[in-house]
Image (cartoon, rainbow, N blue to C red):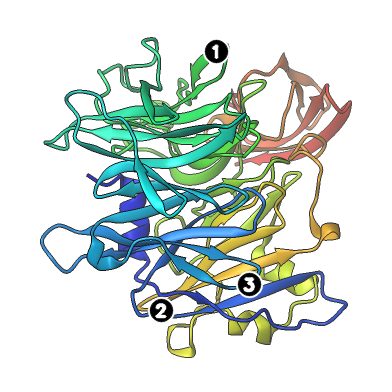
């Protein structure tokens, strides 16, 4: 009765955390890393407040036949103080989200969807036919506490995407969004995120089955799904584990990109990639690094992506920050901002667990991108908090003026918000000239060198990329 995403974190993160005193990194440092040491109950960070001042998480008890969450907690990321909301012996509890004041925490208590406020758990309404649930995210608007998540049936075979306003339940996905990406009736649905203003909800149909998963977005005046199918991927490319920015403008997650060459039985491309989806204009961007399996983990209000590579092998990962179409390794960025190798080592796994990508996994980020939480380590994982100063944060929307293109098995794939393209062969002949509605442009090009000219109408940008087909 626990979502695939949470199972992924829990099984992978047998970690222990308690914040240490913030080290002094010197006046010239534009970033700091706060290392973490272990706690006796192996509690793990799961979420961060939008202002970056608080984190929440819980421990995980897998000693019996049925595993469950215990010891829901919050952490003050400025002082390092941990507050345990529910002791392990009190039973199941989890904390997934927290408001900017650190006073309201959403999660679950005794397998019921709930939020913690004023020292007690407040359980939420569950509709007839369901027995439990969880809160994945929440916001407070004009005094109303709005939560999203899911409720589930006694047999664990049915999940409903849920929204609660002041504890009262309502179905989150409308009647128009009830079938998964393969056209089947969706029975396992959830909500992952809600924007700070309460107007935008991100959810997914069949979220526990990636091959069927179909993210959906519900706003005050519209509801839509995020589709990825095209003629060349045979309906096998899909999105899962989506995550939305606090302002509700951007979505990222894991995009499985599958392409078949014409007439072939097996895929020529099958790779995980981070993506960026604009809620306002319903445009999807994907980001490919040759030979790299990676995925988007979070996105801030500026559309900057926070990715991990590889996606499925914690902690043997490298964290990436993708902004304006460029990807930089987290550790390299910290070194450029004045953090020393020794300071990174202090926040990394101990020597016997050390990997080249020492900080491992990015977990979540604040609304402004100035606070990032993550973890490193294998048999014993160590969480960390990165604090960036004002001048380190790139406030330009991603990829509007840095456009690129590459060719992959019969498709020109675009990175960035591209409104129109022109493609020229080596002799300067114009062979493609069209407006763009997708990141994938079918183009069965012959071997040779081509120039792709890309236009962005918002910024009046014109960029070119050279692609080689061989």
C-alpha gap between disc 3 and disc 1:
42 Å
| Residue 22 place in picture, x, y as percent | 67, 79
- Visible residue check, residue 83: yes
Above or below, 318 relative to 457: below
- Count of numbered circles in the view: 3
Lower position in the chain sequence, tag 3 or tag 1: 3
Q: Which corner quadrant holds the N terminus?
A: top left
Q: Is residue 115 above or below residue 47?
A: above
Give the numbered dot on residue 222: 1
Residue 227 shown left or right of residue 31 in the figure: left
Point out residue 6 in the picture as x, y percentages from the top left corner: 35, 51
**SS of the residue under disc 2:** loop
What x and y, as percent, mark residue 153? 18, 32
Which residue bears the numbered disc 3? 79
Mark 2 or mark 1, whichever is nearer to me: 2
Question: Distance between the Cα atoms at labels 2 and 3?
Answer: 17 Å
The nearer-to-camera label among 2 and 3 is 3
In what element is the residue under mark 3? loop
Q: Does the rendering let one see residue 290?
A: no
Residue that label 2 marks: 39
Q: Position of residue 301 (x, y in %)?
A: 69, 41
First of labels 2, 1 by sequence position: 2
Q: Quadrant of the C terminus?
A: top right
Sequence-wise, which precedes: disc 2 or disc 3? 2
């Amino acid at each position: 009765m626990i979502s695939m995403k949470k199972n992924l974190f829990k099984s992978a993160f047998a970690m222990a955390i308690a914040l240490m005193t913030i080290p002094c990194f010197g006046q010239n440092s534009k970033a700091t890393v706060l290392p973490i040491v272990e706690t006796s109950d192996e509690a793990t960070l799961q979420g961060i407040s939008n202002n970056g001042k608080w984190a929440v998480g819980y421990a995980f008890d897998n000693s019996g036949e049925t595993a469950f969450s215990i010891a829901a907690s919050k952490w003050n990321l400025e002082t390092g103080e941990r507050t345990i909301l529910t002791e392990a012996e009190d039973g199941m509890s989890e904390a997934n989200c927290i408001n900017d004041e650190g006073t309201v925490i959403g999660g679950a208590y005794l397998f019921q969807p709930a939020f913690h406020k004023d020292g007690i758990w407040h359980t939420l309404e569950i509709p007839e036919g369901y027995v439990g649930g969880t809160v994945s995210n929440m916001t407070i608007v004009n005094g109303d506490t709005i939560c999203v998540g899911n409720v589930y049936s006694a047999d664990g075979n049915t999940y409903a995407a849920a929204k609660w306003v002041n504890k009262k339940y309502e179905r989150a996905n409308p009647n128009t969004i009830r079938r998964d990406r393969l056209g089947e009736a969706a029975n396992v649905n959830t909500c992952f995120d809600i924007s700070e203003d309460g107007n935008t909800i991100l959810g997914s149909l069949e979220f526990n089955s990636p091959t069927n998963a179909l993210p959906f977005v519900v706003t005050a005046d519209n509801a839509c799904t995020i589709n990825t199918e095209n003629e060349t991927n045979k309906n096998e490319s899909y999105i899962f584990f989506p995550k939305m920015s606090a302002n509700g403008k951007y979505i990222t997650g894991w995009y499985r990109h599958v392409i078949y060459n014409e007439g072939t039985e097996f895929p020529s491309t099958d790779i995980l990639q981070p993506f960026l989806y604009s809620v306002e204009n319903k445009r999807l961007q994907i980001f490919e690094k040759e030979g790299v399996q990676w995925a988007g983990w979070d996105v801030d209000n500026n559309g900057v992506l926070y990715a991990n590579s590889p996606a499925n092998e914690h902690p043997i990962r490298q964290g990436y920050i993708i902004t304006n179409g460029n990807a930089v390794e987290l550790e390299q960025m910290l070194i450029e901002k004045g953090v020393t190798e020794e300071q990174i080592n202090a926040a990394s796994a101990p020597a016997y667990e050390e990997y080249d990508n020492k900080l491992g996994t990015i977990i979540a980020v604040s609304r402004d991108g100035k606070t990032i939480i993550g973890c490193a380590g294998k048999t014993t994982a160590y969480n960390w908090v990165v604090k960036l100063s004002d001048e380190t944060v790139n406030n330009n929307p991603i990829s509007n003026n840095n456009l690129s293109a590459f060719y992959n098995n019969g498709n020109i794939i675009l990175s960035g918000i591209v409104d129109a393209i022109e493609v020229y062969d080596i002799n300067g002949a114009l062979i493609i000239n069209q407006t763009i509605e997708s990141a994938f442009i079918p183009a069965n090009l012959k071997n040779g060198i081509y120039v792709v000219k890309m236009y962005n109408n918002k910024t009046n940008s014109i960029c070119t990329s050279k692609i080689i087909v061989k």
